[in-house]
Amino acid sequence: MKYIICLMALIWAAPAVAMGPSKRECVLDVPCELGDRSYHVKEPDDWDGTSPMPVVIHFHGWQRTGALPVKHQRISGATRRRGVLLIAPNGQRKTWDMWSPETEDVQFAADVLEDVIKRYPIDPDNIFVSGYSYGSIMAWRVACDRGEEMNIRALLGISGIVGSNDCAQAPQEVRHVHGLKDNVLDFPFGPGGDETGPVALWRSKMGCEGPASTPAEWSAVEILTLTRRTWDCAGDQKVSLDVHPGGHFIPHGWIARQLDELLDRPPVYP
């Protein structure tokens, strides 16, 4: 049995553990303290206080903090409308240590999830990791190193990838978006200008040997059209890549669309 499910069973079986307001004293600008580190929380709209929630752990970009994602319209605006608990850890010195396997930040991410489970009832089958820019690379690192232990169902990466092949694990599903004109973390074109390069690592790791689906266009706002390719992989795993003609940003409606699809909801915006 996976570590996270066992942990939840132990916590919920203990009568001394309460899930009431006293366990939820840290929201938005008030971080949850965890040793000498911390993370931010945004609860979903209209949560009844007891129902288990899907979780998105979102890692902020360089020189930002977790206080930004919990107030960001394209991040928390998506989670709060879909019954999803948003968790935004704070990186040390406003950045992440994500260039090599099993860094201290990987353990921190696992510790954050463990602490969240003590404070909130969560849905263990719907734990997602996400991030933007450097935070996306951090989300990739966590999925690579602790995907199984943390029971991560899906990785939602935005404009940042792990560039090496030192990936020991893989989640059930990987979804990534990248702009062709990204000049901060450049679009990783494959040979001959191949536009599937951003997910090459996952396609190799997850046994995605067949061709991608026929590219399909979609948009949440008129000013930006994304082109999606998907691969069905070994063991019912899946990889999808959304490409857009823009630069280094979180596309309108992208996180919302991924959550709607993963949670079997009709796609809506916002």
Image (spheres, rainbow, N blue to C red):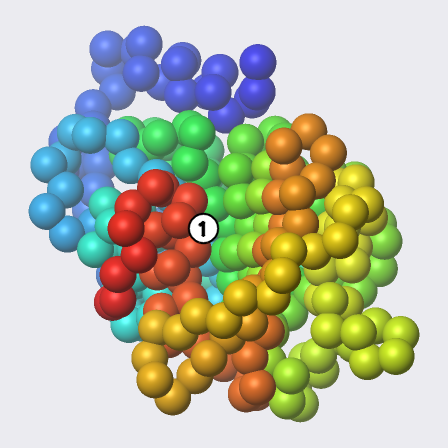
Position in image of residue 84 (x %, y %): 29, 46
**Which residue is painted at 70% across and 45% down in the image?**
144
Is the C terminus in the top left, top right, bottom left or bottom right quadrant? bottom left
**Which residue is painted at 57% across and 86% down in the image?**
245
**Which residue is painted at 56% across and 50% down in the image?**
155
Q: Secondary structure at mark 1?
A: strand
Callout 1 amino acid? Ile
* Front residue (pair 140, 70): 140
Instruction: Tell me: residue 11, above or below residue 162.
Output: above
Q: Is residue 46 left or right of residue 234?
A: left
Residue 106 visible in rendering:
no
Please identify the quarter of the rendering in which residue 123 is found: top left
Q: Is residue 64 left or right of residue 266?
A: right
Position in image of residue 225 (x %, y %): 46, 79
Residue pointed to by mark 1: 57
Is the N terminus in the top left, top right, bottom left or bottom right quadrant? top right
Instruction: Tell me: residue 14, above or below residue 140.
Output: above
Count of picture labels: 1
Can you name the residue that lies furthest to the right here?
A: 191
Position in image of residue 91 (x %, y %): 53, 63
**Which residue is painted at 34% across and 84% down in the image?**
222
* Front residue (pair 253, 226): 226
Please identify the quarter of the rendering in which residue 175 is found: bottom right
Crowdedness near tag 1: few (<14), some (14–19) or many (≥20) residues, C-alpha within 10 Å: many
Instruction: Tell me: residue 135, above or below residue 191.
Output: above
Residue 239 visible in rendering:
yes
Please identify the quarter of the rendering in which residue 88 is found: bottom left
* Front residue (pair 70, 161): 161
Position in image of residue 61 (x %, y %): 52, 72
* Front residue (pair 7, 206): 206
